[in-house]
Image (cartoon, rainbow, N blue to C red):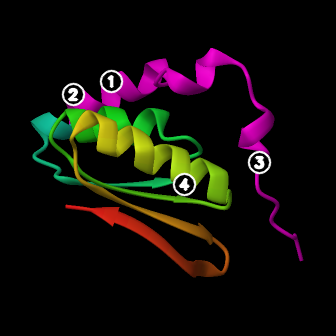
Amino acid sequence: MTISKAWSWEISEDPIWDTPSEDVYYYVERWKEKGFQNILDLGCGMGRNTILFARNGFRTSGLDLSEYGVNKTRKKLDASGHAGSVVCGDINNGASGYRVEKG
């Protein structure tokens, strides 16, 4: 059995983690065309893709093992004025009960 381990986002200084992944821009447009409305960002990290989806009108939810990453994502959502749900948890074992939500 694999033990899940959270990424140490608090020591990451690379600004790439604040920039959405290039391929996600394609999905934003494609999924808008298809009428999708809800996004679950598994392993959302510090929210770079979660925020992009929220800014484009999707109802977003994020899940990450890192409490630091979840809190950072929440702050970014708040600063952007967009709603979303962010939960600290393991995709293998469910949410740990730590939940941050707006909207």
Residue that numbered label 1 is attached to: 26
In primary-sequence order, the first of circles 4 and 3 is 3
Residues marked 1 and 4 touching at CB (< 8 Å)? no
Q: For the residue labelled by badge 1, is the local secondary structure a helix, a strand or a loop?
A: helix
Q: What stretch is highlighted in magenta?
A: 1-30
| Residue 78 at x, y percent in the picture | 31, 45
Return the mark for residue 29: 2
Q: Residue at horizontal 16%, vertical 52%?
A: 37
Question: Could you tell me the amino acid type at mark 2?
Answer: Glu
Q: Residue at horizontal 80%, vertical 34%?
A: 11
Q: Residue at horizontal 10%, vertical 46%?
A: 35
Q: Is residue 44 magenta?
A: no
Residue that numbered label 3 is attached to: 7
Return the mark for residue 65: none
Q: For the residue labelled by badge 2, is the local secondary structure a helix, a strand or a loop?
A: helix
Relative to 54, residue 67 above or below: below
Question: Could you tell me the amino acid type at mark 3?
Answer: Trp
Question: Could you tell me the amino acid type at mark 1?
Answer: Tyr
In primary-sequence order, the first of circles 1 and 4 is 1
- Marks 3 and 1 sit apart, C-alpha to C-alpha, by 26 Å
How crowded pointer 3 is (Cα within 10 Å; few <14, some 14-19, many 20+) is rated as some
Q: Give the mark count.
A: 4
Q: Does the magenta stretch include residue 10?
A: yes
